[in-house]
Amino acid sequence: MISVVIPVRNASATLEICLSAVCGSKYENFEVIVVDDHCSDGSAEIAGRYQVNVISLTPHKGASAARNAGARAAGGDVLFFIDADCVVAPDTLQRVASAFREHPGEVIGGTYTPIPYDKGFFSTFQSIYINHSETHAEKPDYIATHAMAIGRELFWERSGGFREDFMPILEDVELSHRLRDSGMRLVMRPEIEVSHIFNFTFMRSIKNAFRKSRYWVRYSLGRGDMAADSGTASRGLKAMAACTTFSLALFMLGLFTGNILILLLPPLPFLFGMILNAGIIEAFFRHGGPLFGLMAVPYYTLIYPLAAAAGGIAGLVDRLRGVK
């Protein structure tokens, strides 16, 4: 039996789509637990229209506490964590069950479909990037809670649950690292896919890159693993952020000094960054097509990495100020 645990915080825009999909799964032996994290937008009422177990938290406690509450109420052999803006396929739970039979004592992860539920440019960019980042390495560095499966008893025995005193994001990364340190193996099964509803605009995409990078740097500096190839905090993006920022600095220096030789240098680190990111560049063209690829590559190499670099600098400043 699979217990699908969905934390919900004011997710009325996506929850109906999420629950309609999971409740329509072909796999028969499952339950759905929706944890209402003190919503004020009618999310609880939407959940009440489905055959699901609704748990209400008061006051608002955060995603980690909501997932723990759902896991405590679960009666299944397997906990399958997803988010309220995720849409499972009819056979997703069957794939989870099959993977769990093969890896009963391990943490099993799925990923986003390359093409998201909403198919705008910035949403598609993000979905392809996450899909590639989470699946390109043979051994994942973490398992994300948009598609995480683990035995219910093992979850409590090995981890004690998600840390409820942690940062507002990356709680799945922290849990994965803690489980891995306890001796459990992390297994990525790319065939376990969920479609994500991003509804990303340009500004939402940029803000997401800045925010994620800021918290990643704070967390990674604390662990001493800044150079790790860790999912969406990939070495490729880190290299692209460094190369693009360095190229921009050289260009500005050349303009300021009027030195023609310096102005000839910026393409070199930029091209080096593109070479290091050949995999994700190929993924943009393979999944999105030629036109999408021609738009995604300059966005990924020129604009997105600058937002990530700015977030990284903010995270460094946070650490220097003593914020963990």
Image (cartoon, rainbow, N blue to C red):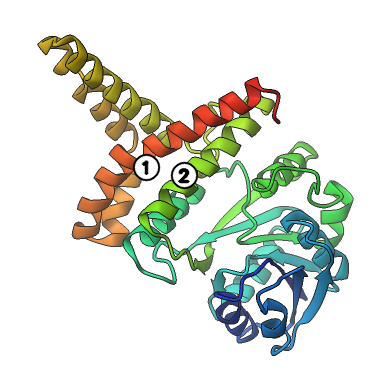
Q: Residue furthest left?
A: 260
Residue drawn at x 30%, y 53% is 284
Residue 101 or 197: which is nearer the viewer? Answer: 197
Q: Quadrant of residue 109?
A: bottom right
Check disc 1 and report the residue beneath it. 304
Check disc 2 and report the residue beneath it. 209
Can residue 22 be seen by looking at this rendering? yes
Q: What percent of the width, then of the height, locates residue 314?
A: 54, 30
Q: What percent of the width, then of the height, locates residue 152?
A: 82, 62
Residue 252 versus residue 137 in the image, above or below: above
Can residue 136 be seen by looking at this rendering? no
Residue 315 versus residue 104 in the image, above or below: above
Residue 92 or 296: which is nearer the viewer? Answer: 296
Q: Is disc 2 surrounded by few (<14), some (14 to 19) or many (20+) residues within 10 Å?
A: many
**Element marked by disc 1:** helix
Q: Amino acid at mark 1?
A: Tyr
Q: What percent of the width, then of the height, locates residue 251?
A: 22, 21
Q: Is residue 72 left or right of residue 50?
A: right
**CA gap, disc 2 to disc 1?**
7 Å
Residue drawn at x 75%, y 43% is 166
Q: Amino acid at mark 2?
A: Ala
Q: Is disc 1 surrounded by few (<14), some (14 to 19) or many (20+) residues within 10 Å?
A: many
